[in-house]
Amino acid sequence: MSNYRIQGATGEWEVVIGLEVHAQVTSNSKLFSGADTTFGAEPNTQVSLVDAAMPGMLPVPNRECIRQAVRTGMAIEAQINKYSRFDRKNYFYADLPQGYQISQLYHPIVGEGSLTIDADDKAGIPEDKVIGIERIHVEQDAGKLMHDQHPTMSYVDLNRCGVALMEIVSKPDMTSPAEAGAYVRKLRSILRYVGSCDGNMEQGSMRADVNVSVRKVGDTELGTRTETKNVNSVRFVMAVIEGEARRQVALIEDGGTVVQETRLYDPDRNETRSMRSKEDAHDYRYFPDPDLLPLELEQDFLDACRASLPELPDAKRARYTDALGLTPYNARELTAEVETFARFETLLAATAGLLGKGEEAVATQVANWSLSVAPGVMNALGDEANPAHATAAAQAAILKMQAAGEISGGQAKEIYEIVLKTGREPGEIAETEGLKQQSDTGAIEAVIDEVLASNTDKVEQYKSGKDKLFGFFVGQTMKAMQGKGNPAVVNQLLKDKLG
Amino acid sequence: MMSDLTQLGVKAIRDGVSGGDFTAREVAEAFNAAVAGAAALNAFIVTTPDHALAAADAVDERRAQGEALGVMGGVPIGMKDLFCTKGVQTTAASHILEGFIPQYESTVSSNLWAAGAGMLGKLNLDQFAMGSSNETSYFGNVSSPWRKDGTNAAMSPGGSSGGSAASVSARIAPAATGTDTGGSIRQPAAFAGICGIKPTYGRCSRWGVVAFASSLDQAGPMAHSVEDCAIMLGAMAGFDPKDATSLKMDVPDWEAALDADLKGKRIGIPREYRMEGTDQAILDSWEQGKAWLRDAGAEIVDISLPHTKYALPAYYIIAPAEASSNLARYDGVRYGLRDLPEGSGLQDMYAATRAAGFGDEVKRRVLIGTYVLSAGFYDAYYTQAQKIRALVAQDFAQAWAQCDAILAPTTPTASFPLGSLSDDPLTMYLNDVFAVPASLAGLPAMSVPCGVTSEGLPLGLQLVGKAFDEQGVLNAGLAIEERAGFTAKPEKWW
C-alpha cells in the first residue's frame, strides 16, 4: 500500500486504480485482413474489403497477431489459454463498418499474470510491488472520424479499422498515481522488449482506460469507479487519477455519490468530463462470432513462442548488477529502453573483444560512456553530429585507448567529437590531432623536475604539511604538458618526488 | 432445335457441347431467350445475357482449340442474388442494397465460371434469404411455374431460393445456385419438383455470399437431377482460405462415384418427424420412399431424434441473432441506400436508412435477434438455443450408430398460394420444420422430387447424411429418383 492519500474534510481517503491498456500489436497486416498497418498513410488507403465490411466479406485471423499476444502473455508470466474464442461486440458507429467489433469477452487468449513495478522512494513506492494482470485479449481497433474536413459533414478514415489491439486489463492493485505511472512504463518496456507493440503513445499505439475509485482509509469495500477512456500518456494517466480522485472525494464529502460512468480527459484543461453514464451504456449484445472457429493453440506453437522471447527487463537488470557489476542506477537506466540496452550491449561486446577481456571487466567503463559521455558529446554537437558515425567499432576503439592510458577522458571526448563530425578513425585522430597523453615516465619526470625547481617555496610549504598544494603541482605539470600527461602517472611520480 | 435445348440439364448440355452436338453459344442463346420470355415469373432481378454469351463463346473457343472445357463447360446457370458478382448488381433482394455493384466475385461463383459455366442473371429470392415463400423480396414475389390443376392462382415457389427453383422448373435455366440456412434450398426444390442439395457446412465457401446466419449458411446447387446436382456441387465446393469456416478437405468426385445400389446401407426413419399438421400426401410419399429404398437394397430402420421438436424454436433464435449482427453493416455509411433527412445526424441516418431499406420480415428477424442477445435475455434464449443445437447434433451422431442416412419429408405440405400465409409468420416458419435439424447439425441434406399431389403439385423427399458424406446422400437420392420416375413439368402459362 502506498502512502498516497487525499486529505478530505472528513478524513483521509485512499484511491484504488485499475488500468485497461490498449496496445496496438506490431504486425504488417490487420487482425482479420491483409491490409497494411503503417501509421500515417493517406486516409482510406489501407482498407481491405473486409475492413470496409463489404457484403459477404469474412474475417480470417492473422497468425502473427495471435503469436504476439501469446508472447506478451508469456512475458508477464500469464496463463496462456490454449482454447480461446472471438466474440462480437455490437454497436453502431460510423467508424465501425461491421456494426460490431470482434473482441474476446468470454474466452480471452491470455489469463492471469503479473508484472513488478520497481521501488522508487522519490515517487512514494517504498518497495517493489507486484501488480496483477487479469487478462489479455485481442480485438479490432476502430477507424477514425474526422470532423475538421468539411463545415457540415464528418469524414471517416478506415486505415486503423481492423488493426489488432491487445487489451491488457490490470487488477485494481494500484493505489497511487505514481504506481499507475510505473505500471504503464513497465508494461510499455515489456511490450517493447517482446516486440509485440512499439509503445508509441503519441501515435496512439498505446492508450489506457483509467478506472478510479476512492474509499476512506481502512474501508475494505471498493467505492464506485469511473472509467476515463483513451488516455495517451503516462503523465496524463497520473493527472487523470489525481484529478478524478479529488473530484470523487469532493463529490462524496458534499453529500453526492459517484456514478459509474465513462469519462473523457481534456488535457488542455486537465480535467475529465462525463461521456455517458451506466444508464446510457450500450447493450453490446456480445455473442461468439460465427464467422470464426475457436482458436486452439498447439503445443508446438506455444513452444516456439516461448523460445522466441528475449531476455526481459527484470532479468536483464539483475544480470547487469549481478554478473556485470553495474550499479543499480546504471542497470536501471540502461535497461529502461530497448534502444539503450541494445546500443550498450553492442558496444560492450565490441569493447571487450577489442581489449581481449571479459565483459564484466569493461562493463562499468562502457556503461558510464554509454549513459553520460557519449550522449553528452552527441547532444553538445547537435546538428553537427552525424549519428551514422556513432559506430560501436569507433567507440570501442576510443574506450580501448582510454583503458590503455593512451588518452585521457577529455581526449576521449574530443576524439569522439571529431568522429561524430567526420567519421574518421579514432586511432588516426589521436595521432594526427595530437590527442594522446604522455605516459613516458622519463619525459614526465623531466617536466616535474622543472615545475618543482621553479616553485621551491611551494615545495617547502608542502613538505611542512600543506597537503592541499599537491593539486597545484599536478595542475602545473599538466599545464606544462598541455594537458597530455597521463594523470595517474603524473600523480604517482609527483608523490614519489615530493616524498 | 433451339427450344429443345432448354429442356436439357447440366450433364446433357455439358456432354452435348463437348461432343459437338451443339455449341455453347446455341445453348446460351436458347436460355437467354427463355429467360426473356418468362418475365411473368419474376424469377430474375437482373438478367445478364452478355455474361452467358461471353462464357459460352469462351467455351466454344476452348473446344476449337482442343482444350478441356471444365465440368460445367457450356452450361449457363442462374445465380441467386445473394452471391456477389463482380460488376453485376447484387441486392439480396433488398432495397438497402439496390444498385450495389460489387468489385469482387464470390468464391462459389468464381469456381463456377472457372469450371466453364456462364450466368443468365441474378435470381430473385426472399429478402436477405429470410422467408419460405419468396414473398419478402423488395423486387416482388416470384411466381411458381406450377399451378394447382385447373386453377390460375399464383403459387409460392418456396423460399428463400424461390427464383432458383422457379427458373429451373420452368426450364429457363438448366440449373441454379441456392443457399440454405434453414431449408432455403430443399423446401423450394420440393415445391418446384427439382433436386437441391445443401452440402456439409463448410464445403462451399461463404466468401462473397451476403450473410444471413453465418453458422448455418451453405451454398448448394438446384437442378433437374441428382447427377446434375453432383456435377455442379463438385464445381462449387472446395477449401477457401478466405473463409475461416471452410472445410480443409479435398472435394470428392461425386459424379463419378454415383451409385444407386444401396445394398448394405441402412436408412433411418426418424419417428419424431411424424408430426401433426403434415399432409397425408406427404406421409404417403414418405412410405413410398421407404419402399423404393428397400427396393434399392437398403435396410429401413426406425430411429429416434428426440430433440427434433426443439430444433425449430432454437433455429428461430440462433438465425435471427446472427442476422441481427450480420445486417448491422447496412447502415448507409459506405454503400447501398442512404436516407439522410435534412438536418439530421448519424443516429437519424441509421434509423431512416434501415427503416426504408429493410422489409418487414427482415426487420422482424433483426428485432428478434437483437432481443435474444440483449442483456438479461441472452442466457434464457441464445445460450439455451445453443444447447439445443448441440443436442440436435448429438441426436444425429447417435443415429449414425444405427443408420447411414435418414429419409424424411422435405416439407409438411406442398406449395401454397402466394399471399395465403403472409400474415402468419409462425405457420410460415413451420415450413422449415423438417429442414432445420440438418441445418443446425451442419449435415448434408437434399430434396429429390418423388411425385405430385392429387392437385398436381410436386412433392419432395429429403435425405440427410453424415457430415462429409454427400456421396451417401446423393446415392440414396439417385435410388429414389430412378424409382420415382418423376417427369411432371409445369404447364407453360407465362
Image (cartoon, rainbow, N blue to C red):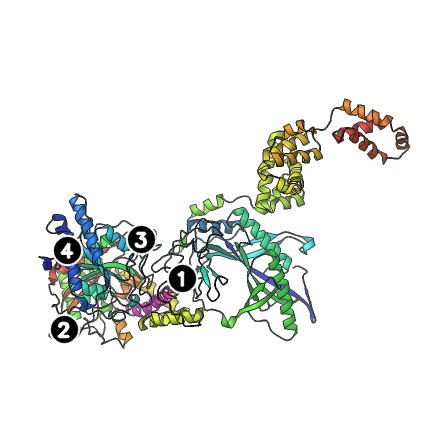
Secondary structure, mark 4, is: helix
Around disc 2, counting alpha carbons within 10 Å, would you say few (fewer than 14), some (14 to 19), or many (20 or more)?
some
Same-chain check, marks 3 and 1 = no
Residue at the (10%, 63%) spot, across then down: B487
Q: Quadrant of residue B470?
A: bottom left
Mark 4 or mark 2, earlier in chain? 4
| Chain bearing mark 1 | A
The segment highlighted magenta reads B305-327
Q: Are marks 4 and 2 on the same chain?
A: yes
Is residue B182 toward the left or the right of residue A12 in the image? left
- Residue position marked by numbered label 1 in the rendering: A98
Q: Position of residue A252 (x, y in %)?
A: 63, 72
Q: Is residue B94 visible?
A: yes
The local secondary structure at tag 3 comes to loop
Chain to which mark 4 belongs: B
Pick the quarter of the image with the C terminus of chain A: top right
Task: Pick the residue in front: B423 or A130.
Answer: B423
The residue labelled by disc 2 is B148
Q: CA distance from mark 3 to mark 1?
A: 24 Å
| Count of numbered circles in the view | 4
Are the residues under marks 1 and 2 on the same chain? no
- In the picture, measured across the screen, residue B151 lies left or right of residue A262, that is left
Given the image, what chain letter belongs to the residue carrying mark 3?
A: B
**Which one is in front in this view, the residue at disc 1 or the one at disc 4?**
4
Residue at which label 3 appears = B247
Q: Which residue is mark 4?
A: B27
For marks 4 and 3, give the CA distance.
34 Å
Marks 3/2: CA–CA distance: 42 Å
